[in-house]
Image (tube, rainbow, N blue to C red):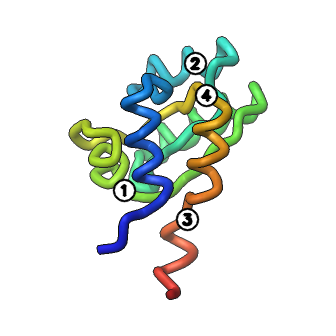
Amino acid sequence: MTTNKALSRMGLAMRAGKLVSGEEIVLKAIRSGEAKLVLLAEDASDNTKKKVADKCESYGVELLIGYTRFELGGAAGKPERVLFAVTDKGFADMIRSGWVQHSEVENIE
């Protein structure tokens, strides 16, 4: 398996304390303006997707959807997690540039 840039950068952001997870904490980060980028697993529930997408839209925070809860959780060294907020612009830019929407693009190399 190739190392995915976005996922390995998520791990770096987590170790640097610039990645938060958990629905309440992430929604709070969006409302407070701390969230620079929100990451949502593609297998999150429709209810969670809608809630997070609406919140991101109303606060102008970019939302990226992709990977599974196991991939995202694993990248951050946590058990399965569906939702993360990146609270640092540098890390947000790095993760965004390596992000792959799994559902649309299947490893074309």
Instruction: Using the rendered view, name the quadrant where residue 89 is placed.
Output: top right
Secondary structure at numbered mark 2: helix
Find the distance from the CA under tag 4 to the CA under tag 2.
11 Å
Where residue 22 appears, x then y in whole percent?
39, 26
The residue that appears at 52% across and 43% down in the rendered structure is 39
Specify few, some or many for label 3: CA neighbours under 10 Å numbering under 14, 14-19, or 20 or more. few
Q: Quadrant of the N terminus?
A: bottom left
Mark 4 surroundings within 10 Å by alpha-carbon count, few (fewer than 14), some (14 through 19), many (20 or more): some
Q: Position of residue 67 (x, y in %)?
A: 42, 58
| Chain-order first, disc 2 or disc 1 | 2
Q: Point out the tag, 4 or 1, that comes first from the N-terminus.
A: 1
Task: Measure the alpha-carbon separation of dots 2 and 1.
Answer: 22 Å
For the residues labelled 2 and 3, the Cα–Cα distance comes to 23 Å
Q: Is residue 104 left or right of residue 61?
A: left
Label at residue 88:
4
Q: CA distance from mark 4 to mark 3?
A: 21 Å
Residue drawn at the location 40% of the way across and 51% of the way down: 8
Label 4 vs 2, first from the N-terminus:
2
- Looking at the image, residue 39 sits to the left or right of residue 22; the answer is right
- Give, as a three-letter code, the residue at label 2: Ala
Tell us which disc is closer to us: 4 or 3.
Answer: 4
Rounded to the nearest whole Å, what is the CA distance between mark 4 and mark 1?
A: 23 Å
